[in-house]
Image (cartoon, rainbow, N blue to C red):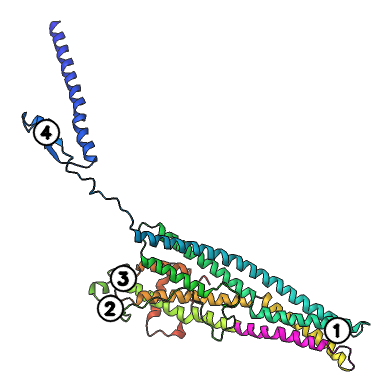
Amino acid sequence: MAAVQAHHRLFLASTCAGQQRRRLRPSRIAAPCRAAVSGGVRTAQSPSSSSSGSGSPSSLRLNLDWVDPRIVAVPTSSPGAQVEVEKLRAIAEAAADRAEMHDIIGRQRDNWNHLLLHSNNSLALAASVMAALAPAAPTVVALKASAGVLLASAAVTMAAVNKIPPSQLAEGQRNATRLWRQLERDVRVTLALAAPVTRADVHDAMDRVLALDAAYPLPLLPGMLDKFPKTVEPTRWWPKKKQQQQRAPVNKSNSFGSSSRRRGARGNGWTPELEEEMRGILRVIKAKDEHEYITVGKMVLGLNKGLAVAGPALAGTAAVAAAFIGSGEAGAWASGAAVLGGALAAAANTVEHGGQLGMVFELLRNCAGFYRKMQEEIEANLGEADVERREDGEVLETKVALQLGRSTSELKQFRRLASPSFKDDDVKDFAGKLF
């Protein structure tokens, strides 16, 4: 019995000692961990434990006196960088304001188109009815005078509306609203990025603002763009890229001069196959897409010019004919001429403004400008001899595919079109599928 009690006491003593060791072990470990997190790991012997020997763990402690808190610098923006940020914010606010103004003015000019269309047609048709009834009516003088006044008013208003077609103005404002909002989003994204804002970012944004102001001016008169230009050119709403000082000719030798790259090695996402794709797409855009929109735009412009002249001319002729109603032998044909002239003037006005030929012409110019912009972006990348200074090839390929409404795999079919043996007349398909 005494042996069992002694064994039990020995077991309890060893258990308590083990628990004490387990309680002490975290204290020795936690202290260095907490000190290390606070900024230092250098250890040194404490003066109190130097006499007891350097081998024991208690003789080691963390010396944090060597840590200089001034070394850990918090990144702060310089006053110059803060100024550039404020400039970009001002540009973003201006872009948002411009977008709102163009949206409001575009909706108002669209209302003008509907109101003036119906008003001019009502004037011309009402005058035609009066001119038809005047010869048989007892009040012939009043009817022919009313018909003449209405036809003259219709001729003047048609001429004014044809000079500044509201449908064309409204289409320009709609496209300008979209582009201004796009510019605002781009500036906001630049401000949200962690990279510092540079002066080049501000200059690029300002150039885009000035280009948009020139392409889509807000004033009606003066400053309005010519609605009946002598030559049809794509609308340009982006700034011209500055020519680099050293620009080598675009060919395979200067873009992929090393043998490893000729074998298909990648450089900034560019490969010889991708260059062939871009050259093929560039060729199709020039030969088909942009050319098609310019050609159709010329046809629409010619039709619009003819109707813009015919409407007021017919209404004016009808007004002159209405003055001779009831005057002897000329009264019979004068009434018919007034009726016919007023009806034809209303028909010409309906085709021109009801069909919104001005809007169609502006839309065609904007579509041609869309392809011209894409063309210049591709040319700028292919014209850069150093592939590392180009835009990433895969990113550019994805952007071009999205703009054309195609997948990246579909772009591979344009490689064969880059061959000099392939003629422009042999190009049958268009590059874009969206429009």
Whichever of labels 1 and 2 marks the residue nearer the N terminus, that label is: 1
Q: Is residue 432 visible?
A: no
Q: Tell me the crowding category of disc 3: few under 14, some 14 to 19, or many 20 or more residues within 10 angstroms, Cα based.
A: few
Q: Quadrant of residue 280?
A: bottom left
Whichever of labels 2 and 4 marks the residue nearer the N terminus, that label is: 4
**Residue at the farthest top position:** 1
Residue 49 position, x and y percent, is 9, 30
- Horizontally, residue 35 falls left or right of residue 188, namely left
Which element type, helix, strand or loop, lies under badge 4? loop
Q: CA distance from mark 1 to mark 2?
A: 79 Å
Q: Amino acid at mark 1?
A: Lys
- Horizontally, residue 195 falls left or right of residue 318, namely left
Residue 318 included in the magenta stretch of the image: yes
Residue 426 position, x and y percent, is 45, 84
What residue is shown with label 2? 254
Q: CA distance from mark 3 to mark 4?
A: 58 Å
**Principal secondary structure, stretch drawn in magenta:** helix
Residue 46 badge: 4
Q: Quadrant of residue 416?
A: bottom left
- Horizontally, residue 80 falls left or right of residue 233, namely left
Whichever of labels 1 and 4 marks the residue nearer the N terminus, that label is: 4
Whichever of labels 3 and 4 marks the residue nearer the N terminus, that label is: 4
What residue is shown with label 3? 389
Frontmost residue, 178 versus 61: 61
Which element type, helix, strand or loop, lies under badge 2? helix
Q: CA distance from mark 2 to mark 4?
A: 68 Å
Whichever of labels 2 and 3 marks the residue nearer the N terminus, that label is: 2
Nearer to us of marks 3 and 1 is: 1
Frontmost residue, 347 versus 119: 119
